[in-house]
Amino acid sequence: MSLWQSIEESIYQATDEMFSIKSRDSISGGCINEAYRIVGSNKNYFVKINQASNLAMFEAEFKGLEEMAKTRSVRVPAPVVVGKVAGQAYFVMEYIAMGGGSSTIKFGEQLALMHRSSQEKFGWSQDNTIGSTKQVNTLCADWVNFWAKYRLNYQLTLAASKGCGSRLISLGEELIERVPDFFSNYQPEVSLLHGDLWGGNFSTDTNGNPVIYDPATYFGDRETDIAMTELFGGFGQDFFQSYNATWSLNDGYQSRRDLYNVYHILNHFVLFGGGYAHQAERMISSLLAEVE
Ligand code: ADP
């Protein structure tokens, strides 16, 4: 069976409704997968395609979208089915027509609501990916250890294996030892996170409702999501103010912002190489200067 026949069949199995593809358009904008809108006679779906070896990545994204949907806060695409055939993995989800203008005020309120969703420990029921890098979500009662070990140390080790150079390694090792210093007056709550909240993973539907997608979900400090909205821009002061008005951030957020964002910069070095190593070095040097 061909890829597209198999997708039609698996949509039928998952929804109990026959679906036949009338047309399909390629969608750009993603970093990792090929993406398509498939059009049926009265329904459309959004489909991501990758090599079969990436099936687990799609399964984890499916569960992440389900976990976020349960909170009934920010709109996320409803996942439909994941499968593989003929060497390829696919992920079918609800197609959401985007483009109703920006609604960052509403998004601030809804994200704060999503962050209220909690569990006992930091981490998640399974590992997932950040970009295409493995993200370790081993359950852990202690956030400081979690961040030091499964976020910073994990990425630093990968960066070392990609030849990032000894200066970044020694700065990174020093930062890992100093992580507790950033938490002397702060105990984060366990919050459900999007995990990869840059502007490219946020949009609005045609009614102007915020939509988030392509998550790297786990339970952690909500400041990590807020920090990432500031890393590449695009969310603005309205978002920040409405988030804070709904659930105010701790005063020490500014001092931890780059401690959280350096994880993504290290990951960018691991994925793309180049100048990200220097950016990580600069961020780490100023973080270390703060706790001297
Ligand atoms: P990747 O996993 O390759 O990074 P994304 O999940 O970011 O791909 O999706 C690529 C683009 O497709 C997004 O930037 C967005 O514009 C659009 N998109 C993502 N999910 C949907 C969806 N469910 N419905 C419609 N468009 C979507």
Image (cartoon, rainbow, N blue to C red):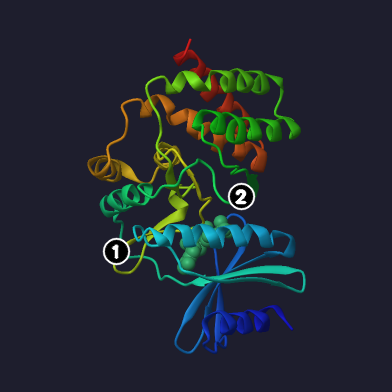
Q: Nearer the viewer, residue 140 or 275?
A: 140
- Residue 185 in the image: state x and y as whole percent: 37, 21
Q: Residue at x 54, y 18 (%)?
A: 178
Return the residue nearer the eye: 247 or 200.
Answer: 247
Note whether residue 273 is visible.
Answer: yes
Q: In the rendered image, which residue does mark 2 sit on?
A: 129
Res. 69 image quadrant:
bottom left
Residue denoted by label 1:
208
Amino acid type at circle 2 is Thr
Which residue is nearer to you in this view: 270 or 153?
Answer: 153
Residue ID at (43%, 27%): 256
Q: Residue at x 63, y 21 (%)?
A: 173
In this orientation, does residue 29 appear?
no
Work out which quarter of the rendered image holds the N terminus and state it. Answer: bottom right
Identify the secondary structure beneath mark 2: strand
Mark toward the start of the polypeptide (2 vs 1): 2
Q: Are marks 2 and 1 in contact (CB under 8 Å)?
A: no
Relative to 162, is 203 above or below?
Answer: below
Q: Is residue 251 above or below residue 111?
A: above
Please tell me in which quadrant of the rendered image residue 156 appears.
top right
Q: Position of residue 105 (x, y in %)?
A: 26, 50
- The crowd level at tag 1 (other Cα within 10 Å; few <14, some 14-19, many 20+) is some
Q: CA distance from mark 2 to mark 1?
A: 29 Å
Establish whether ligand 1 lies closer than 8 Å to the Cβ of label 2. no
Q: Is residue 101 above or below residue 216?
A: below
Q: Where is residue 134 shown, x and y percent of the image?
A: 65, 46
In this picture, is 289 found above or below 82? above
Q: Is residue 204 left or right of residue 260?
A: left
- Viewed as shown, does residue 60 lie left or right of 286? right
Amino acid under disc 1: Gly
- The mark lying in front, picked from 2 and 1, is 2
- For disc 2, the neighbor class at 10 Å (few under 14, some 14 to 19, many from 20) is many
